[in-house]
C-alpha cells in the first residue's frame, strides 16, 4: 500500500488531479484552495523523494507503464537514480519557490494550478521514455510558463513574454516535426528503441529529424546569441517565476538532452561548441549588466551552457563515470544557488546592482548573498567546486586544454560580474534602509542555502574528499558564528582558543617542510590575532571568518592530495577576501583581490590537472615524481603562486587589499597569509627540479623575484601613506623569498625558510605597530605623524628592532638571510641578479629609514600633544614577536634543526645538494663580508643620492622629508604605473567587447525569432555541411 | 494524375505553406499578422506530418464496411501520425490562444501592435 | 531592406532543407511492425473500430491527458492574462471604472465585447488613426471605436444571423454530441466534438452579443470532467492493467454503440471538457 502510495505515477495523478481540482476548491473557499495546492505540491515532492530513496536502496529503476500495455505500444516512464535526483531536487526548490511566490499565488487559482502543473510537467520531461510524450510535457511546461509570465503586468514583462513565446514556439515546432519524421524513419517513438536502433536513423530525413530535435533542446537552453528572448524574461518576470524558468524548466530540458544524448553521438562536438560559446559569451556580456535579474539571467544561461559542454565533452571522451559528479554537481549548484539569488533579489526588491539599497547593515543578508555567489563562482565548499575540479581533471587528462582554458576564462568573467554585485552591496548605506525583509520572506532563501551546504558535503564525499578534517575550519567558523552576539573581545578569545586547538590538531599531522610551515604560521597567527583584542567593538562575523582562515592554513599544509590543497587554498582566498571586505574603504579593492586570486587559483587548477594527467594521481607526492614533461605544469603552478605572492606585474591587487583591510588584519595578511603562496611555490619547485629545463625557468623566476623586490621598494618610496608603504615593503620582501626559492638549492631553501620566519615576525610587528599609531593619531599619512618616539617609546623600540631585523643588519636573525642569498646567486653565476640585489638593498634601506624617521623623529604635528602609548593589547603580541626574533637570533639552532630535518628529505636522493649540513653553511659562506660590501654599496649610493638632491637649486635644506619628497616625484616621473595601466587596459578592452557584443540583443522579438531560425540553420550547416542544402546531397 | 505520389504532393504543399508562414512571421511587423503566420507555419507542418503516415493506396484506419479487420493490416494507413497530429493541433491551438491573449495585453499597454514597439528590455 | 534580404536567405535555406527532405521521401508501401500491431490489436483488445481513437485514448492516453492539461492551463492563463487589473496602474482606472459601474453605453458595451476579437486585428491596422473614445483605455477604446463603426452599419446582428443561429445552434450542438459519443466507432472523438460544440458557443455569442456564458458553471464542469478523467484512469489502474486502461468495462461487440470498454466514457468526458474549455476561452477573449 505504501509502495503504491509513493509510486512515481502518483506525481502525475497529484499534478493533474490536483490541477483539475483547484478550480473546484476555489469555489469552496481560499483555505481549501491553499490546502489543496500545498498538499498536491508537497505530495509530488514526497513521492519523488520516497521513490528516489527506494531506487537508491534497490539499485533498479522503477518502470512506470501506462494504459496496461507494454512499451513501445504505450507510453512508459522511468524513474531511475538520475531521474529521481533531478525530479526530487527540482521538487524541493519548487516547493520553496512557491513559498517565495506566495504573495502572487495565494488566492489566485489560475496561477496555483499553472504552478502545480508546471512542476509536474518538469518531472514528466525528466521521466518519460517516449519522444512524443516528451514533446507534450515540453508544451505543458512551456504553456505553464507562459501563463505564469502573465503574473507581471508591466508592458516590458508582457513584451518579454511574447518574445519568449515566439522563440519557444519555433523551437518546439522543430521538436514536433523532428519527432514525426523520426517516426517516419524508424516506425517507433519509444526512446529506448530509438537509441537501440540508432544506426538505422540515416539518410537526409533521419539526419535532419535528429537535428531538429537537438536544435529544439539546445534552443530551449537559450544558446548564445539566440537567447535574447530568455534574457528579457529573466529580467522582467517576477523573481519566483524567473527562478523557475532558470532552474526548473531548464532542468527539464537539460535532462531531456541528457536522455537523448545517445542519439546525438555525431553531434557531441557541436553541443560542446554551442555550450562553450554560450558559456563564454553570456559571461562576457554579463559584465556590462547592472540589472540584477538580467545579470542572473546571463549567469543562468551560461551555467546551462557549461552543463551542456560538460555533458557532451565527458561523453565524447568516454569519461561517463564522471558525469554524475560533474553534471549532477553543476546542476544542483546552479539549481540551488540561482534560485536563492533570484529570490534574494526579489525579497530585497533590488532591480539594479547600483541601487541604493545597501546590505552593509544586514550581515545575515550579506552572508546569504555571499554564500550563493561563492557557489555560483564554483568555489568550495559547494558542489560546483567539486564538479569543476573533476571536469578540469578529466579534460586535462585527455589533453582538451583549449576547453579547460575556455571554462576557466568563462568562470572568471562570471565571478567578476557576480562579485561586482556583492561588492556594491557592501557599500555603506547612504540612507538607513527601512526594516529588513521579514523572516517568512527569507525562509525559502534560507532553505536553499541549507540545501546548498548539504549538497556541497555530498559532492565532496562523491569526490573522495569527505574526510571530516577537511571541514574542520568551516565547522569551527559556523560554531563561532553561533556566538556572534557576544562581546567582541570574548569572541576574540574564543577564536584564539579554537584556532590554537583545532589548528594545532591539524598541524600535528603535517610532515616535513609542511609541518615546519604549519608550526611557524600557526604560532604566528595566534600571536598576531591576539592583537585584535585592542578593538572592543563587536565586529560581526569577523572572528568566525578569521578562525576559518587561520585553521585552513594548517589544514592546507597537511593536505595529502592536490584536491585537498586546492580546496583549502580556495577557502583561504575566500576567507581573506571576506575579511578584507570588512575594511571600511575596501570596496573596490575586494573585487580586484578576488579576481587576481581566482586567476591564480585557475592557474593552480590547471597546473595540478596537468600533473595529475601525467602521473595519474592527485597525490601531492606526485610533485616529486613527475618527470621532465611536467615543465608546463610547473610554469602554471609557479604563475599561480606568484600572482598570490604579488609578483611584479600582477601585484596590482596587493597594495589596495593590504592598505584598506582592517589594520590588525593587514598584519595577518602580510605576515601569515602571504606565506601560504610561498609554501606553494616551494613545493611546486620540486617539479622544476625534476624537469630538464629547470635552470632557465629557475633563472626566470629568480629575476621575477628580484624585480618584484626592486619594484616593491621603489613603490614603497613613492608612498606618503605609511600603511601602504609597508604593503609595498611586503611585496618587496616576498620578492627576496621568491628569489631564494628559485635558487633551487639547499642553500636557497634554507635562506627562503629563514626569510619566511623573519618576515613573518617583522611584518607582524610593523603592521601591529602601525595599527596602534593609526589608532592614536587617526591618520595614515606621514604628514600627520612625526616625533612619536617620545610619546610611544615602547612602540618605537619594538619597531626599531623589527626594522633592524628586516634590514639584515647584525646581530638579529635577519642577518644572514639576504647576504646568503646574494652569495648564493654569485655562486650560481647569476651576477647581474646579485648586482640588482645590491640596488634593492639600498632601496630597502631608504624606505626603512623613511618609515622610522617619518613616524618617530622630527617635529610633532600640531594637535597631537596628548598622544599616548598604543594599547597593551597591541604591545604584547609585538613584544612576543620581538622575543621570537631575539631567541632565534641567539639560538639559531632552534630554527635550523627543524629546517635541516625538514629540507634534507625533501630532495630526492639524486638531487641532494652535496649533502652539506647546515652548520657548515655559515662556515662556507660567511655572510659578514657580503653584508659589509652591501652596506658599503648602499652607503655610497645613499651619498650619491643625497648629493644629487643637494645639487639642485633651492634644495639646500637638509630636511629628510624634502629629500624623500624630491625622490618621490622623480620616481613618479620615471616609473609610470605600467602594470596598473595594463590591467586597466585589459579591463577596458573586455568591457568594450562586452558592450559591442550585447548590441546583438536589440529587444525586438521578431529579430530574436530570426536568430532562432538562423541558429538552427547554423547547427544544420555545421552538422551536414553544404550538402545538407542540396536535394541530391 | 501527375505521377507524383499523393503524400509527396501533400508534403510539397505543406512545406510551401510553412515557408510562406516563415516569410510572413519574419517580415510582418504587426503582431496579429505574426500570429497568423505562426499558425500558417504550423498548419503547413501538420500537413507534412499527416502525409508521412500515408501508405500507398491506404485508407483511414477505422474498421467499418470499407475496411474489414482482416485487411486492416494491409490497407490502413499508419494511425500514429494522425493521432499525433490531433494532439499537435490542440497544442497549436493552445499556443495561439495564449499568443492572442498576450497580443491583447500588448495592445492595451501601448495602443499599437507593432512588434518594434516592445523593445523595453534589451542588452 | 537588409532585413528582408536576410529573411529571404533564411527562407530559401529552409526551402532547400525542405526540398531535400521531399527529395528523399519515399511513400511507405506497408505498415511498419508497430503500426501493424496497433491496427490489428486495437480492435481486438480494445474493441474500438476507430484505431486512432484507440491510440489517443488508450495507448497514448497519457499524451491525451497531458493535452487536456494544456487546454486547461490555457483557459487559466487567458484568465490570468485578461483579468482586469485590481490595482489602478497606468491603464487600469477606466477599465476598473467600467467594471464597477457606469454601464452607460449599454448598447455599445456588448457590441464592443462581441467585436473584441476582431477589434484587436482591425485596430492594429488602424492603430495610428485610432482616436480613443471617451472610454479612453486602449482595449476599450479600440473596441469602442470599432463598435461605433459596427453600429453605424449594423447595430444589432442582422436578422439573418439571428435566425440562422436559431436554426443552426441545435444542429451544431447535436452534431457535436454525436461526434463525441461516436468517437470510438467512426471519425471523431472528444476533441473534435468538443471543438464543434465550442464553435456553436462562439456562434451564439456572435449572434446574441448580450448573452453571457455561465463561465463559473462551465469551469466547474471543466474541472469535474478533468477530475473524473483522472479518476477513470485510476480505476483502470486498479481494475484493469494500468493507468488509463479502459478495459475495466466490458469490451462489447466491435462496432456497437456500447462497446470498447471505457473509451466512449472517456471520450465523452473529453468532449465535455474540451467544449467547456474552449467556450470559456472564447468568452474570456470577449470580455
Image: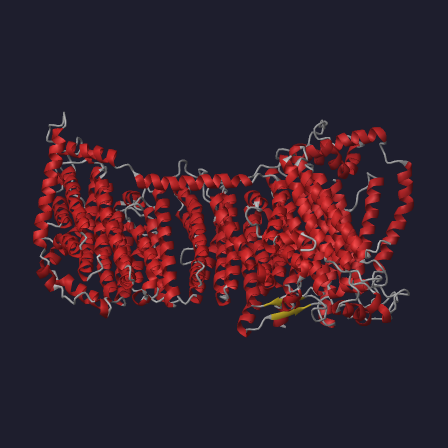
Q: Is residue A30 visible?
A: no
Q: Quadrant of residue A498?
A: bottom left
How far from the left and from the top, in percent, is residue A845?
Answer: 14, 43
> In the image, is residue A796 above or below residue C101?
below
How far from the left and from the top, in percent, is residue C43?
Answer: 82, 69
- Of all residues, the one furthest to the bottom in this rendering is A58
Viewer-proximal residue among A27 and C94? C94
Viewer-proximal residue among C199 and C91? C199
> If the image is split into quadrants, where does the N terminus of chain A sit?
bottom right
- Of all residues, the one furthest to the top in this rendering is A954
Viewer-proximal residue among B79 and A941? A941
Tell me what residue is drawn at x 20 percent, y 61 percent: A745
- Of all residues, the one furthest to the front in this rendering is A1032
Tally of numbered discs: 0
> If the image is split into quadrants, where does the C terminus of chain A sit?
bottom right
> In the image, is residue A909 above or below residue A953?
below
In the rendered view, does A405 fall on the left or right side of A585?
right
Q: Quadrant of residue A783?
A: top left
How far from the left and from the top, in percent, is residue C261?
Answer: 81, 68
In the rendered view, does A73 fall on the left or right side of A812?
right
In the rendered view, does C95 fall on the left or right side of B76?
left
> In the image, is residue C140 above or below residue A381?
above
Report the coloring of the rendering. secondary structure
Q: Is residue A861 visible?
A: yes
In the rendered view, does C180 fall on the left or right side of A946?
right
How far from the left and from the top, in percent, is residue C238?
Answer: 71, 71
Amino acid at each position: 500500500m505504501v509502495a503504491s502510495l509513493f509510486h512515481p505515477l502518483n506525481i502525475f495523478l497529484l499534478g493533474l488531479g490536483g490541477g483539475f481540482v483547484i478550480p473546484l476548491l476555489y469555489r469552496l473557499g481560499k483555505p481549501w484552495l491553499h490546502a489543496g495546492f500545498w498538499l498536491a505540491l508537497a505530495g509530488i515532492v514526497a513521492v519523488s523523494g520516497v521513490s528516489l530513496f527506494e531506487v537508491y536502496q534497490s539499485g533498479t529503476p522503477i518502470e512506470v507503464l501506462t494504459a496496461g500495455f507494454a512499451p513501445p505500444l504505450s507510453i512508459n516512464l522511468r524513474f531511475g537514480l538520475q531521474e529521481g535526483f533531478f525530479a526530487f531536487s527540482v521538487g524541493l526548490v519548487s516547493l520553496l519557490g512557491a513559498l517565495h511566490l506566495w504573495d502572487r499565488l495565494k488566492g489566485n487559482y489560475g496561477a496555483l494550478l499553472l504552478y502545480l502543473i508546471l512542476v509536474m510537467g518538469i518531472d514528466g520531461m525528466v521521466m518519460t521514455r517516449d519522444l512524443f510524450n516528451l514533446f507534450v510535457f515540453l508544451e505543458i511546461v512551456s504553456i505553464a510558463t507562459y501563463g505564469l509570465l502573465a503574473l507581471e503586468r508591466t508592458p516590458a514583462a508582457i513584451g518579454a513574454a511574447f518574445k519568449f513565446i515566439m522563440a519557444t514556439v519555433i523551437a518546439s515546432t522543430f521538436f514536433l516535426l523532428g519527432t514525426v519524421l523520426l517516426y517516419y524513419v524508424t516506425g517507433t517513438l519509444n526512446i529506448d528503441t530509438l537509441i537501440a536502433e540508432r544506426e538505422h536513423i540515416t539518410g537526409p530525413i533521419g539526419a535532419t529529424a535528429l537535428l531538429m530535435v537537438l536544435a529544439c533542446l539546445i534552443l530551449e537552453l537559450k544558446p548564445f546569441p539566440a537567447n535574447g528572448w530568455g534574457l528579457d524574461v529573466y529580467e522582467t518576470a517576477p523573481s519566483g517565476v524567473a527562478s523557475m524558468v532558470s532552474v526548473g524548466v531548464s532542468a527539464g530540458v537539460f535532462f531531456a538532452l541528457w536522455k537523448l544524448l545517445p542519439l546525438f553521438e555525431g553531434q557531441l562536438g557541436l553541443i560542446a561548441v554551442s555550450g562553450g560559446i554560450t558559456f563564454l559569451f553570456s559571461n562576457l556580456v554579463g559584465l556590462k549588466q547592472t540589472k540584477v535579474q538580467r545579470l542572473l539571467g546571463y549567469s543562468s544561461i551560461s551555467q546551462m551552457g557549461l552543463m551542456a559542454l560538460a555533458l557532451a565533452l565527458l561523453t565524447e571522451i568516454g569519461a561517463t563515470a564522471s558525469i554524475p559528479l560533474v553534471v549532477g554537481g553543476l546542476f544542483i549548484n546552479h539549481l540551488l544557488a540561482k534560485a536563492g539569488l533570484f529570490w534574494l533579489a526579489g525579497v530585497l526588491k533590488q532591480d539594479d546592482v547600483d541601487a541604493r539599497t545597501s546590505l552593509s547593515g544586514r550581515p545575515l543578508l550579506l552572508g546569504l548573498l555571499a554564500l550563493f555567489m561563492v557557489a555560483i563562482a564554483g568555489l568550495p565548499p559547494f558542489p560546483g567546486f567539486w564538479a569543476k575540479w573533476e571536469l578540469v581533471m578529466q579534460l586535462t587528462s585527455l589533453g582538451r586544454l583549449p576547453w579547460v582554458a575556455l571554462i576557466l576564462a568563462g568562470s572568471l568573467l562570471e565571478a567578476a560580474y557576480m562579485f561586482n554585485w556583492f561588492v556594491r552591496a557592501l557599500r555603506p548605506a547612504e540612507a538607513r534602509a527601512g526594516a529588513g525583509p521579514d523572516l517568512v520572506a527569507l525562509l525559502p532563501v534560507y532553505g536553499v542555502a541549507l540545501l546548498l551546504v548539504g549538497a556541497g558535503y555530498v559532492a565532496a564525499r562523491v569526490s573522495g574528499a569527505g574526510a571530516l578534517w577537511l571541514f574542520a575550519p568551516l565547522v569551527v567558523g559556523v560554531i563561532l558564528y553561533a556566538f556572534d552576539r557576544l562581546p567582541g573581545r570574548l569572541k576574540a578569545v574564543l577564536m584564539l582558543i579554537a584556532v590554537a586547538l583545532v589548528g594545532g590538531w591539524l598541524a600535528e599531522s603535517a610532515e616535513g617542510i609542511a609541518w615546519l610551515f604549519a608550526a611557524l604560521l600557526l604560532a604566528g597567527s595566534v600571536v598576531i590575532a591576539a592583537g585584535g583584542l585592542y578593538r572592543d567593538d563587536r565586529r560581526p562575523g569577523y572572528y568566525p571568518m578569521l578562525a576559518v582562515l587561520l585553521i585552513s592554513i594548517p589544514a592546507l599544509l597537511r593536505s595529502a592530495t592536490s584536491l585537498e590543497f586546492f580546496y583549502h587554498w580556495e577557502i583561504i582566498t575566500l576567507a581573506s577576501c571576506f575579511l578584507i571586505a570588512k575594511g571600511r574603504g575596501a570596496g573596490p579593492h575586494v573585487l580586484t583581490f578576488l579576481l587576481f586570486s581566482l586567476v591564480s587559483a585557475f592557474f593552480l587548477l590547471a597546473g595540478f590537472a596537468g600533473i595529475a594527467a601525467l602521473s595519474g594521481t592527485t597525490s601531492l607526492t606526485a610533485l616529486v615524481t613527475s618527470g621532465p614533461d611536467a615543465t608546463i605544469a610547473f610554469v602554471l603552478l609557479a604563475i599561480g603562486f606568484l600572482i598570490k605572492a604579488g609578483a611584479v606585474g600582477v601585484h596590482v591587487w596587493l597594495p589596495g587589499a593590504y592598505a584598506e583591510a582592517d589594520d590588525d588584519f593587514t598584519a595577518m595578511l602580510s605576515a601569515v597569509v602571504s606565506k601560504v603562496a610561498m609554501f606553494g611555490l616551494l613545493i611546486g619547485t620540486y617539479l622544476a627540479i625534476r624537469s630538464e629545463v629547470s635552470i632557465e625557468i629557475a633563472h626566470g623566476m629568480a629575476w621575477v623575484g628580484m624585480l618584484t623586490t626592486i619594484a616593491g621598494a621603489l613603490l614603497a618610496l613613492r608612498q606618503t601613506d605609511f600603511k601602504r608603504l609597508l604593503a609595498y615593503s611586503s611585496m618587496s620582501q616576498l620578492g627576496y623569498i621568491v628569489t631564494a626559492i628559485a635558487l633551487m638549492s639547499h642553500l636557497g631553501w634554507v635562506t627562503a625558510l629563514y626569510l619566511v620566519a623573519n618576515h613573518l615576525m617583522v611584518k607582524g610587528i610593523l603592521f601591529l605597530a602601525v595599527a596602534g599609531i593609526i589608532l592614536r593619531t587617526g591618520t595614515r599619512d606621514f604628514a600627520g605623524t612625526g616625533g612619536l618616539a617620545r610619546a610611544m617609546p615602547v612602540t618605537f623600540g619594538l619597531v626599531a628592532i623589527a626594522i633592524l631585523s628586516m634590514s639584515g643588519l647584525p646581530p638579529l636573525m635577519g642577518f644572514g638571510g639576504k647576504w646568503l642569498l646574494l652569495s648564493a646567486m654569485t655562486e650560481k653565476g647569476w651576477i647581474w641578479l646579485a648586482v640588482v640585489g645590491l640596488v634593492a638593498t639600498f632601496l630597502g634601506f631608504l624606505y626603512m629609514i623613511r618609515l622610522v624617521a617619518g613616524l618617530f623623529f622630527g617635529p610633532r604635528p600640531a594637535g597631537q600633544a596628548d598622544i599616548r602609548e598604543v594599547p597593551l593589547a597591541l604591545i604584547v603580541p609585538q613584544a612576543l614577536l620581538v622575543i621570537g626574533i631575539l631567541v632565534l637570533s641567539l639560538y639559531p639552532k632552534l630554527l635550523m634543526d627543524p629546517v635541516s630535518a625538514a629540507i634534507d628529505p625533501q630532495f630526492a636522493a639524486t638531487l641532494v645538494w652535496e649533502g652539506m649540513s647546515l652548520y657548515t653553511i655559515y662556515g662556507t659562506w660567511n655572510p659578514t663580508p657580503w653584508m659589509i660590501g652591501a652596506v658599503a654599496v648602499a652607503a655610497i649610493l645613499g651619498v650619491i643620492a643625497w648629493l644629487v638632491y643637494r645639487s639642485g637649486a633651492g634644495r639646500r635644506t637638509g630636511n629628510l622629508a624634502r629629500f624623500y619628497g624630491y625622490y618621490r616625484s622623480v620616481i613618479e616621473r620615471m616609473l609610470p604605473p605600467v602594470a596598473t595601466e595594463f590591467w586597466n587596459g585589459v579591463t577596458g578592452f573586455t568591457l568594450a567587447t562586452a558592450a559591442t557584443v550585447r548590441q546583438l540583443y536589440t529587444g525586438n522579438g521578431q529579430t530574436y525569432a530570426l536568430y532562432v531560425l538562423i541558429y538552427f540553420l547554423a547547427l544544420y550547416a555545421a552538422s551536414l555541411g553544404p550538402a545538407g542544402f542540396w536535394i541530391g546531397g | 494524375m501527375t505521377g507524383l505520389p499523393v503524400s509527396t504532393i501533400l508534403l510539397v504543399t505543406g512545406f510551401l505553406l510553412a515557408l510562406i508562414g516563415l516569410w510572413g512571421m519574419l517580415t510582418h511587423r504587426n503582431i496579429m499578422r505574426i500570429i497568423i503566420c505562426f499558425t500558417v507555419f504550423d498548419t503547413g507542418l501538420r500537413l507534412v506530418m499527416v502525409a508521412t503516415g500515408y501508405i500507398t493506396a491506404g485508407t483511414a484506419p477505422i474498421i467499418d464496411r470499407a475496411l474489414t479487420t482482416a485487411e486492416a493490416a494491409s490497407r490502413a494507413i499508419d494511425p500514429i501520425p494522425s493521432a499525433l497530429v490531433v494532439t499537435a493541433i490542440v497544442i497549436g491551438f493552445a499556443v495561439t490562444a495564449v499568443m492572442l491573449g498576450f497580443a491583447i495585453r500588448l495592445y492595451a499597454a501601448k495602443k499599437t501592435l507593432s512588434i518594434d514597439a516592445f523593445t523595453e528590455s534589451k542588452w | 531592406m537588409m532585413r528582408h534580404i536576410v529573411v529571404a536567405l533564411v527562407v530559401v535555406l529552409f526551402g532547400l532543407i525542405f526540398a531535400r527532405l521531399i527529395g528523399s521521401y519515399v511513400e511507405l508501401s506497408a505498415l511498419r511492425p508497430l503500426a501493424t500491431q496497433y491496427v490489428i490489436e486495437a480492435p481486438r483488445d480494445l474493441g474500438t473500430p476507430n484505431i486512432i481513437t484507440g491510440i489517443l485514448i488508450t495507448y497514448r492516453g497519457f499524451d491525451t491527458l497531458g493535452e487536456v492539461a494544456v487546454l486547461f492551463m490555457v483557459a487559466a492563463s487567458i484568465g490570468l492574462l485578461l483579468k482586469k487589473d485590481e490595482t489602478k496602474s497606468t491603464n487600469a482606472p477606466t477599465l476598473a471604472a467600467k467594471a464597477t459601474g457606469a454601464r452607460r453605453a449599454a448598447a455599445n458595451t456588448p457590441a464592443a465585447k462581441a467585436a473584441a476579437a476582431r477589434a484587436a486585428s482591425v485596430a492594429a491596422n488602424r492603430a495610428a488613426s485610432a482616436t480613443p473614445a471617451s472610454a479612453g483605455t486602449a482595449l476599450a477604446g479600440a473596441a469602442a471605436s470599432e463598435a461605433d463603426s459596427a453600429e453605424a452599419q449594423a447595430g444589432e446582428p442582422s436578422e439573418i444571423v439571428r435566425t440562422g443561429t436559431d436554426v443552426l445552434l441545435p444542429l451544431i450542438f447535436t452534431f457535436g454530441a454525436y461526434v463525441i459519443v461516436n468517437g470510438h466507432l467512426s471519425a471523431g472523438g472528444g476533441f473534435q466534438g468538443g471543438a464543434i460544440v465550442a464553435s456553436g458557443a462562439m456562434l451564439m455569442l456572435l449572434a446574441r452579443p448580450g448573452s453571457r456564458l455561465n463561465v463559473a458553471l462551465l469551469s466547474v464542469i471543466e474541472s469535474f470532467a478533468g477530475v473524473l478523467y483522472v479518476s477513470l484512469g485510476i480505476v483502470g489502474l486498479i481494475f484493469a492493467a494500468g493507468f488509463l486502461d479502459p478495459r475495466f468495462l466490458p469490451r462489447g461487440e466491435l462496432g456497437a454503440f456500447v462497446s470498447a470498454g471505457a473509451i466512449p466514457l472517456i471520450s465523452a468526458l473529453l468532449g465535455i471538457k474540451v467544449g467547456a474549455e474552449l467556450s470559456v476561452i472564447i468568452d474570456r477573449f470577449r470580455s
